[in-house]
Image (cartoon, rainbow, N blue to C red):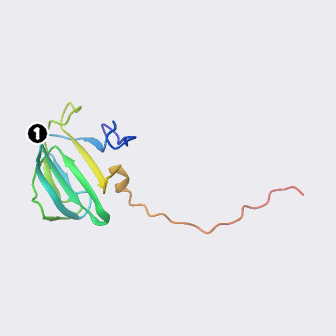
Amino acid sequence: MLRRFQLPSTPYGPGHRGVDLGGTDGEAVLAAADGVVSFAGPVATRGVVAVTHAGGVRTTYEPVRPEVTVGQWVRRGEEVGRLMPGHEGCATACLHWGARRGGEYLDPLRLLSTQRVRLLPWREPPLTGGT
């Protein structure tokens, strides 16, 4: 990872609303989870793909050359585009991966956890010597 997520303190304040992941020009960019392509095209000078997932989470991938179309269903791990150079702050090609739920920016790396929380029954610790 080249740059971590940094939640802005205000909606328009400074921060980093995603993570930058190192890659190579032309490398396949894969969907993080099953969903529907909600955007695929240019934003300013960069190609962007957005995928809307269950629970209202939307992930974005940039700069990419889209390989999908709006309305297309994609599965986790399916190619959505090809990485292109041109992301600010990256010497070579790198992927800016973002995530939002409604108006709230999320750390996309937290979406990767496959660990389920498992609560164990509480047991009182044994008493140690003493009267």
In this picture, residue 50 sits left or right of residue 105: left
In the picture shown, does residue 67 fall above or below 26?
below
**Which residue position holds label 1?**
45
**Quadrant of residue 89 in the image?**
top left
**3 or 70: which is nearer to us?**
70
In this picture, residue 107 sits left or right of residue 40: right
Residue at 38% across, 53% down: 110
In the picture shown, does residue 106 fall above or below 94?
below
In this picture, residue 102 sits left or right of residue 66: right
Label 1 sits on a secondary structure element that is: loop
**9 or 23: which is nearer to us?**
9
Residue at 51% across, 66% down: 118
In the picture shown, does residue 80 fall above or below 123?
above
Sort mark 1 into few (<14), some (14-19) or many (20+) by Cα contacts within 10 Å.
Answer: few
- Quarter placement of the C terminus: bottom right
**Quadrant of residue 34 in the image?**
bottom left
Q: Position of residue 18 (x, y in %)?
A: 30, 45
